[in-house]
Amino acid sequence: SHLTKATSADGYTRWVIENKPTMLPDPDYQEEQYGLEDPRIVYLEDFDKYAIIYVSFSRGGPVVSIALTQNFQHFERIGCVMPPEDKDAALFPRRIKGKFVLIHRPIIRGEAHIWISFSPDLKYWGEHRILIPTRPGWWDHHRVGLGPPPIETPEGWLILYHGVRITASGSLYRVGIALLDLEDPTKIIYRSNRWIFGPEEQNDFFGDVPGVTFPTGLIYDKESDQLRMYYGTADKFISVATADYSRILELIKRGD
């Protein structure tokens, strides 16, 4: 697997997909032996570059890797930053108290919670702790994983995450939200009790993995008060959904 760039003037229509891969596995990095997937992208002012946080499939399992780029043509690989099995990772767009912050999802003894870690340089990470655990018996019982990179709002860091519940017909992936403290993202201000988005459309159920809504991109347009979420459907299509941020904020304030 590899990563390929697509561009659109309005984010909805007339997408132009490059006719060759934008980022291929590098043979000098053994963790990329079996490919790359699930990128999350943020702009880092510290480097005047975009950071791509992606899953590398190594012989030992999936790991979290980071690469930097200014033009999406040339890439500076930092390499593997989290050992297997780890996925669903994204960086905060700025340092917090002098440190870079990463949210990711390791699987340890079958437990799949969302973790948070800190780094002075993007390469060496520590202060690991669970941020968002699974909830037994609930819609996010069996597995949780971060969606897009966190969005900074006046109320806190807004994050979307997917929750998995295993049913008789297979795994069901739905979306929840959480709000983290701006200066201490280990503190959860709010976590949705209910899922706010899930598979409904035909495309959500007819693909490689039916019943999956898997968000990895989020844009907040302050002028229009609109959130635009890009997500994978059934592991086959890329879709977009919109919501007014003010309505999401009302949901948070009600504590639903």
Image (cartoon, rainbow, N blue to C red):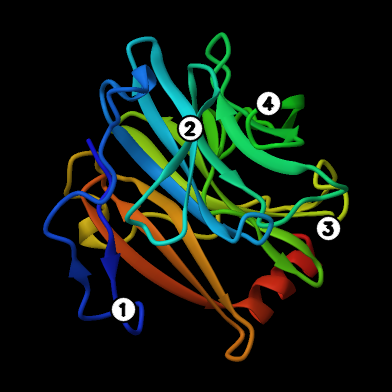
| Residue at numbered disc 1 | 12
Q: According to the image, label 4 marks what residue?
A: 124
Q: Nearer the viewer, residue 256 or 65?
A: 65
Q: From the viewer's perspective, is the residue at label 2 or at label 1 nearer?
A: 2
User: To which residue does mark 3 refer?
Assistant: 182
Residue sitting at x 28%, y 20%? 33
Q: Is residue 92 left or right of residue 62?
A: right
Q: CA distance from mark 2 to mark 4?
A: 12 Å
Amino acid type shown at disc 2:
Ser
Residue receiving disc 2 = 65
Verify CB contact (< 8 Å) between mark 2 and mark 1.
no
**Quick one: label 4, few (<14), some, or many (20+) residues within 10 Å?**
few
- Quarter-wise, where is residue 18 in the image? bottom left
Q: For marks 4 and 1, give the one nearer the viewer.
A: 4
Distance from Cα at disc 4 to Cα at disc 1: 38 Å
Q: Is residue 3 left or right of residue 182?
A: left
Q: Picture coordinates of residue 34 (x, y %)? A: 25, 23
Q: Amino acid at mark 3?
A: Leu
First along the sequence among labels 2 and 4: 2
For the residue carrying disc 2, how many other residues have a C-alpha within 10 Å: few (<14), some (14-19), or many (20+)?
many
